[in-house]
Image (cartoon, rainbow, N blue to C red):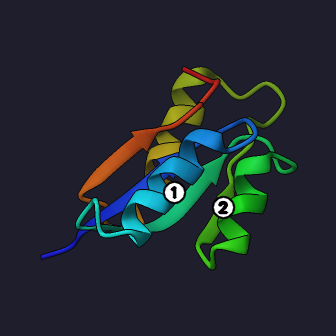
Amino acid sequence: MSMRFVVLASGGGTNLQAVLDSCAAGVLDAAVVAVVSNRPESGALVRARSAGVTVRCVERIGTETRADYGTRLAGAVTAYAPDVVILAGWMLV
């Protein structure tokens, strides 16, 4: 059974690309079902779109607390029912 990966990435997406390539080559019995970024112009979202993967940007809103942002981010991630969440260059920890 193939595992469902959701990848969180903020940067250029080179780590994401390695995951995508490993899935495509059958090295990993998995599929990247979504890529989530906190930066709408991140290279990771560009790479994900090019690979046909669903993308979502979840930016922190104004005076939103880290706890509230975390709750909103968790909701966005769990909506894709992942088996594994990968932090691949996620810059907001």
- Give x and y (percent) for residue 21: 49, 60
What amino acid does circle 1 point to? Ala
What amino acid does circle 2 point to? Arg
Q: Residue at x 64, y 24 (%)?
A: 91
Q: Residue at x 60, y 34 (%)?
A: 69
Mark 2 secondary-structure assignment = strand
Asked if the residue at tag 2 contacts the one at tag 1, i.e. Cβ–Cβ closer than 8 Å, the answer is yes
- Give x and y (percent) for residue 79: 42, 66
Q: What whole-number distance in Å separates the C-alpha atoms at marks 1 and 2?
A: 8 Å
First-in-chain label (1 vs 2): 2
Where 5 falls versus 38 (above or below)? below
- Give x and y (percent) for residue 1: 12, 76
Where 60 falls versus 78 (above or below)? above
Q: Which mark is residue 56?
A: 2
Out of 10 and 29, give the one closest to the viewer: 29
Q: Residue at x 87, y 49 (%)?
A: 41
Quadrant of the image occupied by residue 24: bottom left
The residue that mark 1 highlights is 76
Q: Which mark is residue 35?
A: none
Q: Residue at x 54, y 20 (%)?
A: 93
Q: Nearer the viewer, mark 1 or mark 2?
A: 2
Out of 24 and 8, give the one closest to the viewer: 24
Q: Is residue 79 left or right of residue 57?
A: left
Mark 1 secondary-structure assignment = helix
Q: Taking the image as drawn, is residue 21 in sight? A: yes
Near mark 1 (Cα within 10 A), the count class, few <14, some 14-19 or many ≥20, is: some
Where 18 falls versus 51 (above or below)? above
- Give x and y (percent) for residue 12: 75, 40
Q: Is residue 51 left or right of residue 40?
A: left
